[in-house]
Every structure is written in structure tokens, then in C-alpha cells.
Image: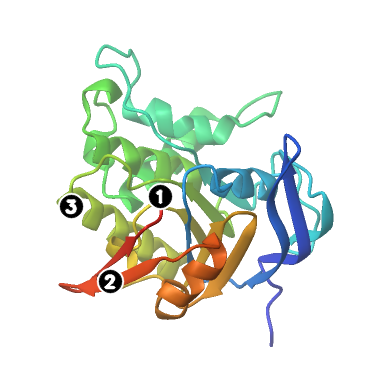
Amino acid sequence: MTTLPVVELEQARIRLGGRIILDDITLTIHEGEFIAILGPNGAGKSTLLKTLLGLIKADAGSIRILGRTPHRGNKDIGYAPQHRTLEADLALRARDVVGFGLDGNHWGIGLPSRKRTALIDKALHEVNALDLANAPVGQLSGGEQQRLLIAQALLTNPRLLLLDEPLANLDISREGEIVSLIARVCHDRNVAVMLVTHDINPLLPVVDRVLYMANGHSAIGRADEVVTSQTLSQLYGSPIEVVQALNRLFVVGAET
């Protein structure tokens, strides 16, 4: 039995402020797939996520999330936006931040406190952060705060997880921990993951495909198919060199 694709883009064009971010992109993502989204600053990586969230409408073509047009407040999508370190004196506990994922944009009577607590604790446990539940969130490390954002995104049992720069400003050790966590969630929940990053290297062992965006164009495929001198030179319209050394990929001649 085939499953409904989680994300479908067919000849889609996304425009922002008069500028074409993506043009004529066709892409299908299935449940359990881990997709890394790369490209230079301003390429529209975050804009693509906002389009899937229903915050921006496609200019042409079609976009479907589980067979439906993207719309705001879709509980089938878990979203962790770009993270900025919180103030040290912020008067919120970790469980309070995670609980925001249950509130969304909905009005009316919330969940009973016991059920709400159970859902939050379950999400914290899944990201190995239950011991941080009552800690002041501003005193947590960047990696610990990122775990909370992922837990928040998981609260509605999403089919699609959109993560915007979850590895930003983390040291190599914390990067590895967060990558392993996301890969485990992807596998255990069979959820589709689309993760925006500036560096493919921490993800090479776990990612299924790479979507590389530049100059309104894109390429999709395995990392060894997309992150190549030939493909990136075509996307940028100028010579780009991809060098492999010490099991890492280095892109020379492009702003990444």
C-alpha cells in the first residue's frame, strides 16, 4: 500500500517582495525522509518553510501538504523557527516554553492540566530533556534550548517537521547530539523532516536527500549528487569548487 506524499511541489514558483525565491520546482517528500535544505544567505530557505506553513502563497504551480493546500495552524506540521539565545533572567521554565506548542493560535478552553503536563513531559522525555523541565530556560545552554524547541514542535504528533537552522551557534559536540536526536525522531516517528542548514557536514551520515537553493533555482538529490562542483556552478552561474577532505565537504567560491 502506497502512502500519500507528505509534501508535493509541482512546477511551483515562490516570490517574496517581487523577487523570485524558487522557480519551477517539482519535489515530492515521503514520510520518514530526512531532507537538508542548503543555500546562501537570502536564497529563500526560510521562505520555503513559511510557504509550507501557509504563511506565504505560491505564485504559480501547486503545493500540497498531505494532499491539501498549505494553511495556517496545520497540526500535521511541527515547526521550530530560527533560535536566538534567550535572556538569562527570563522568568520561564523549560516546560512553559514547550507548552507553547499546545497553544498555537487556538482560542477557547485549553487541555486539562493533568493531560497537558503528561504531553509536555512525554515530549521532554523524547528529546532527553525531562530533567530540565523546571529549569529556568534562560540559564540553559544553546543545545538544551534547541531540544526544547524540538519538543515543542513534536507536541501535536506532526507528520512533517520543519526545522530552521537548529544547528546554528552550536559547538561540534552539541551539533552531533542534535543531529542524532533529529535522526532518531525521524526514524521512530516515521515523520518527514526538512531541515535548513548552512553546513551539510554534520548531516551527511543521516540525511536522505539535499535540496540546494541559489539564484531562484534548485537541485534535489543525494548529497553526492547535489553538492558537486558541476551542480553548484550551474546553480550559481559562476565557477564553484567542491573539495572533499577529512570526510568533509567544502564549498569554495560561494557564500554558504
Relative to 197, does residue 220 appear above or below in the rendering? below
Q: Which residue sits at x=76%, y=55%?
A: 13
Q: Which residue is mark 1?
A: 255
| N-terminal-most mark, 2 or 1 | 2
Instruction: State which quadrant residue 3 falls in.
Output: bottom right
Residue at the image position 27 percent from the left and 21 percent from the top:
138
In the displayed image of the protein, which residue is found farthest to the bottom? Answer: 1
Q: Report the disc number at residue 74.
A: none
Q: Quadrant of the N terminus?
A: bottom right
Q: Mark 3 highlights which residue?
A: 172
Q: Amino acid at mark 2?
A: Val
Q: Are the residues flagged by discs 3 and 1 in contact, CB closer than 8 Å?
A: no
Residue 50 seen: yes
Q: Residue at x 47, y 76 (%)?
A: 230
Secondary structure beneath disc 1?
A: loop
Residues 26 and 235: in front is: 235
What is the tally of numbered marks visible in this picture?
3
In the drawing, what numbered circle is on residue 243?
A: 2
How far across and how far down the image is residue 111, in percent? Answer: 58, 32
Q: Determine crowd level at label 3: few under 14, some 14-19, many 20+ residues with C-alpha closer than 10 A.
A: few
Dot 2 alpha-carbon crowd within 10 angstroms: few under 14, some 14 to 19, many 20 or more: few
Q: State the SS at label 2.
A: strand
Residue type for callout 3: Ile
Image height check: is 66 above or below 5? above
Q: Is residue 228 left or right of residue 252?
A: right
Q: CA distance from mark 2 to mark 3?
A: 20 Å
Disc number lying in front (2 or 3) = 2
Tag 1 or tag 3, which sits nearer the N-term? 3
Looking at the rendering, which quadrant does residue 215 occupy? bottom right
Kind of residue at badge 1: Glu
